[in-house]
């Protein structure tokens, strides 16, 4: 049976004006084959009111076997494989609709947190083999990146989908960091190579597992 991996990235946001490598990469890899899986790559908006419905529609429409969300983290020097998503929105920097949130749950009544179901250690090992700076991170923040990670993991749980899902932060690219002296950055080609290495590990995990039994899509 054909398998799919949902890959999402964001469009530019206030702290990275004009360019977000994750949205560019998601669109570039859309339709690409990784082993026996096809990537469904989508750029999503940096706004809670838009990104939430978009992610939920994507899960209902594509019924992916796995999902990897990406976000840019200016100032981080490495690909950060996130371990935890929290059920909270709390930020002072407005999203692209100009909205700020304080102590607001992503889903009322939802679990307080989800652990990533990605093969975290194999992904980190693969990135090390590629000589790409990488780290395990225990905080995806409480902004839109954490929101995407929680929404995907929550969607998988509600669908009864045991497939791997999670989030990776990437550094900003050098061209978008020129006005921030000393800020770490990473070339787009290196980010791309790292995400492809992660996707190969995700696909290998899917291949080793039996096909999931999932709840039927709603009419």
Image: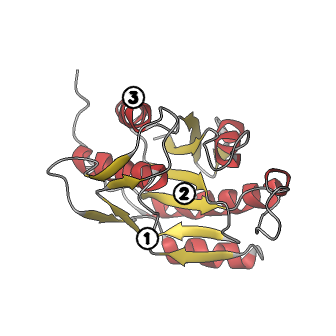
Q: Quadrant of the C terminus?
A: top left
Dot placed on the residue nearer the N-terminal end, 2 or 3: 3
- Mark toward the viewer: 2 or 3: 3
Picture quadrant where residue 185 is located:
bottom right
Picture quadrant where residue 210 is located:
bottom left
Query: Mark 1 — residue?
Result: 83
Give the Cα distance between marks 3 and 1: 26 Å
| Residue 212 appears in the rendering | no
Query: Mark 2 — residue?
Result: 203
Helix, strand or loop at disc 3? helix
Q: Position of residue 134 (x, y in %)?
A: 65, 75
Dot placed on the residue nearer the N-terminal end, 3 or 1: 3
Query: Mark 3 — residue?
Result: 61
For the point 43% across and 56% down, the residue is 146
Q: Residues within 10 Å of mark 2 (few under 14, many from 20)?
A: many
Where 8 sits versus 143, above or below? above
């Amino acid at each position: 049976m054909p398998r799919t991996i949902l890959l999402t990235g964001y469009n530019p946001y206030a702290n990275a004006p004009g360019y977000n490598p994750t949205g560019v990469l998601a669109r570039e890899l859309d339709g690409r084959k990784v082993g026996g899986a096809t990537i469904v790559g989508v750029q999503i908006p940096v706004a809670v009111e838009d990104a939430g419905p978009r992610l939920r529609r994507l899960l209902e429409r594509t019924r992916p076997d796995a999902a990897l969300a990406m976000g840019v983290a200016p100032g981080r020097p490495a690909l950060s494989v996130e371990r935890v998503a929290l059920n909270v929105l709390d930020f002072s920097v407005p999203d692209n609709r100009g909205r700020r949130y304080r102590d607001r749950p992503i889903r009322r009544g939802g679990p307080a947190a989800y652990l990533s179901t990605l093969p975290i250690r194999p992904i980190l090992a693969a990135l090390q083999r590629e000589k790409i700076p990488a780290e395990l991170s225990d905080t995806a923040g409480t902004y839109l990146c954490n929101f995407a990670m929680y929404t995907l993991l929550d969607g998988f749980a509600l669908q009864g989908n045991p497939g791997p899902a999670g989030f990776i932060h990437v550094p900003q690219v050098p061209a978008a960091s020129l006005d921030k002296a000393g800020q770490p950055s990473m070339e787009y080609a290196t980010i791309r190579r790292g995400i492809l290495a992660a996707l190969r590990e995700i696909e290998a995990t899917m291949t080793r597992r039996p096909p999931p039994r999932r709840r039927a899509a709603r009419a």
